[in-house]
Amino acid sequence: MANKDYVRRGRGSSKQPARKKNAPRRKPWRSGLIALILVGGFGYGLYLLSQDPEPEQPVQAQPAKPKPKPKPARVIPPAPEEKWDYVETLPNREVKVEAKEQVVSDIPYIMQCGAFKQESQAEERKLEIAFQGIKSEIRKKEGSSWYRVVLGPYTLKRDAERDRHKLQRAKIEPCAIWKEAQ
């Protein structure tokens, strides 16, 4: 097999680009001439416009002011009749709402805001909760090494929810609410 250099194959001399045999030569002077003619025509048009005299402003005679006609008295139509009687009845109406009695459970609710292996961590959480104005305590379950931070007992779940939202706004979470097992 013959050794061919495929890299240099197809390259012509680097000084002059390859041209097709029948390709017409470009003539850059034609486009320059066309541009020159267009610019010259535009300039001539501007020259002609600047030579036109300004038209005279027509003088308008001011017509005599006619006497203003008296405006007819404006007639206000009568107020429409109300189709509804709520305008009179609404201020005198009373709405009676029967509030449901709050169910007080025998079993109180408690809220736990953390369970920690070390008592010092539980003390830190208790201190954070105390800064929010809520009392908490640390409980250690028998037979376990976990220290739980507990709030409560709450008779109503609504009270526990209120404290939990207060702690969430202070970025103290997660806190869970459940009924205390006795």
Image (cartoon, rainbow, N blue to C red):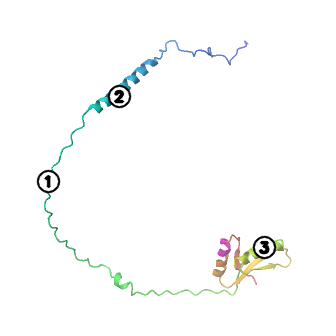
Q: Amino acid at mark 1?
A: Pro
The residue type indicated by label 2 comes to Gly
Q: Which of the two marks, 2 or 3, is nearer to us in this view?
A: 2
Q: Compared to 15, does 135 lie above or below?
A: below
Left or right placement of residue 10 versus residue 111 in this view:
left
- Secondary structure of the residue carrying tag 1 is loop
Nearest to N terminus: mark 1 or mark 2: 2
* Residue at the spot 36% in from the left edge and 85% down from the top edge: 89
How far is mark 1 from mark 3, CA to CA? 94 Å
Asked if labels 2 and 1 touch by Cβ distance under 8 angstroms, the answer is no
Residue segment shown in magenta? 165-169
**Chief secondary structure of the magenta portion:** helix
* Residue that appears at 65% across and 81% down: 159
Mark 1 neighbour class, 10 Å CA radius: few under 14, some 14 to 19, many 20 or more: few
Question: In the rendered image, which residue does mark 3 sit on?
Answer: 124
**Kind of residue sitting beneath label 3:** Glu
Q: Earlier in the sequence, mark 1 or mark 3?
A: 1
Q: Is residue 152 left or right of residue 49?
A: right
- CA separation, marks 1 and 2? 45 Å
**In the foreground, 124 or 62:** 62
Of the numbered discs 2 and 3, the one sitting upstream in the chain is 2
| Residue marked by disc 1 | 63
Q: Position of residue 55 (x, y in %)?
A: 22, 38
